[in-house]
């Protein structure tokens, strides 16, 4: 039985660090295990300009403890007004590693996102030319479409067209949640990949809704039926280069989640690798964990593979994690699936 893993230090290809009071916690929690992360730009106001990118990156690095290292890979928030030159300059100079597309209204702070996809065509053409990856929140926002069907509808009605118009555009379908998305990503060329989150691999919609609503399991895209979760697990343990870890760790204050209109997002940065080791072990696929956490994403983004390693060991007893972390504005609950893991990252 394997009780120790030594793997290339992981990266997180989808992370919300938030800002200000949150940064001393979020930055250092991620930096404990991850070398780099794609930093989501959905702040209030969103990161839409290179000057915002520069300042936000500075705030992130200022919050990093001196004994840790962490490379925040910055992104621009795409709006219908984004200047293509800004994207080109940002990517070519290395200030940004990707652009994030939110359909307007799809999720937290997405109101400035895209309503009319025709308007962003010129930007997508330039991005294809310079090979700048586009990270997509893949859900339609039409209120007539059931929330559990919004990912599939996005593939059928929006993503297929974007990709047909731009087969050379590098696209990451973020935080996929359905077998439909897995099948679509597998059926398309090497310019399409997907991130998968810790929570979508761990819980299904019964965990969210049966026996009482669990606000800390509520995220977007919302978790689906068990067969969809199983399709995600199968995809990530297959070792396919098209799937890599994007935790989508998205902390909100408890008071904002445990509310009459609770915010979407699970805070998974604290225990992601321990949870993943448990899932991969259950699938007898521990040998594929490193591909998912540390190799596939770097290759897709055209980045180097990290040179240092981390150790994850299996103990006799379940690993304990803090239930909540405190910020000056209140507490944030750490994601806790309905199973325990005996794995622990050694730092
Ligand atoms: C994210 C957030 O809170 O910023 N929430 C979530 O449920 N995943 C936004 C997102 O990635 O959809
Ligand atoms: Zn996200």
Image: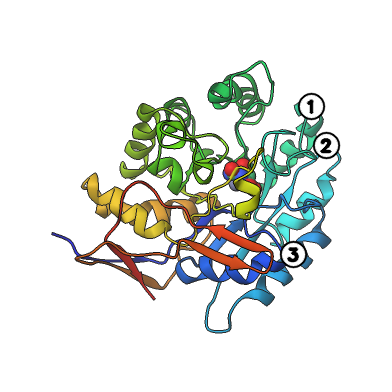
Name the residue nearer the viewer: 308 or 128. 308
Disc 1 residue lies near ligand 1 with CB under 8 A:
no
Residue beneath disc 1: 116
Place of residue 221 in the rendered image (x, y in percent of width and height, measured from the top left): 56, 35
Q: Quadrant of residue 271?
A: bottom left
Q: Is residue 133 visible?
A: no
Which sits earlier in the primary sequence, circle 3 or circle 1?
3
Viewer-nearest of labels 3 and 2?
3
Whole-angstrom CA distance, mark 3 to mark 2, is: 22 Å
Kind of element beneath mark 2: loop
Q: Residue lying farthest bottom?
A: 66
For the C terminus, which image quadrant?
bottom left
Q: Is residue 299 above or below residue 243?
A: below
Residue beneath disc 2: 80
Kind of element beneath mark 1: loop
Q: Is residue 98 visible?
A: yes
Residue at left offset 58%, top offset 67%: 326
Place of residue 179 in the rendered image (x, y in percent of width and height, measured from the top left): 42, 27
Kind of element beneath mark 3: helix
Question: Dots 1 and 2: beta carbons under 8 Å?
Answer: yes
Label 1, residues with CA under 10 Å away: few <14, some 14-19, many ≥20: few
Place of residue 112 in the rendered image (x, y in percent of width and height, measured from the top left): 80, 40
Disc 2 residue lies near ligand 1 with CB under 8 A:
no
Disc 3 residue lies near ligand 1 with CB under 8 A:
no
Which sits earlier in the primary sequence, circle 1 or circle 2?
2
The image quadrant where one finds ligand 1 is top right
Whole-angstrom CA distance, mark 3 to mark 1, is: 28 Å
Residue beneath disc 3: 56
Question: Dots 3 and 1: beta carbons under 8 Å?
Answer: no
């Amino acid at each position: 039985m394997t009780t120790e893993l030594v793997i290339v230090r992981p990266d997180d290809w989808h992370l919300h660090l938030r800002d200000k009071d949150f940064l001393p916690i979020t930055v250092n929690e991620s930096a404990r295990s991850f070398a780099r992360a794609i930093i989501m730009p959905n702040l209030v106001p969103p990161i839409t300009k290179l000057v915002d990118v520069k300042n936000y990156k500075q705030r992130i690095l200022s919050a990093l403890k001196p004994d840790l290292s962490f490379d925040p890979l910055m992104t621009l928030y795409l709006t219908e007004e984004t200047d293509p030159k800004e994207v080109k300059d940002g990517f070519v100079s290395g200030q940004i590693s990707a652009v994030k597309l939110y359909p307007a209204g799809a999720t937290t702070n997405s109101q400035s996102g895209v309503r009319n996809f025709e308007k962003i065509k010129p930007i997508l053409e330039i991005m294809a030319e310079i090979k700048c990856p586009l990270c997509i929140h893949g859900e339609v926002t039409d209120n007539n479409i059931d929330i559990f069907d919004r990912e599939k509808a996005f593939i059928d009605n929006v993503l297929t067209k974007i990709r047909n118009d731009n087969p050379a555009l590098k696209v990451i379908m973020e935080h996929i949640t359905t077998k439909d998305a897995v099948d679509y990503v597998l059926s398309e060329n090497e310019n399409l990949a997907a991130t998968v989150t810790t929570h979508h691999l761990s819980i299904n919609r019964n965990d969210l809704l049966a026996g009482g609503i669990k606000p800390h399991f509520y995220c977007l895209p919302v978790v689906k039926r068990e067969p969809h979760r199983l399709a995600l697990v199968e995809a990530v343990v297959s070792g396919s280069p098209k799937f890599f870890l994007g935790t989508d760790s998205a902390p909100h204050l408890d008071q904002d989640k445990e509310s009459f209109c609770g915010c979407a997002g699970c805070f998974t940065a604290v225990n992601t690798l321990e949870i993943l080791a448990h899932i991969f072990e259950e699938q007898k696929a521990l040998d594929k964990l490193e591909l998912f956490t540390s190799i596939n994403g770097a290759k897709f983004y055209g980045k180097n593979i990290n040179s240092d390693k981390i150790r994850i060991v299996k103990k006799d007893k379940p690993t304990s994690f803090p239930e909540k972390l405190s910020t000056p504005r209140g507490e944030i609950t750490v994601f806790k699936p309905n199973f325990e893991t005996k794995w622990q990252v050694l730092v």
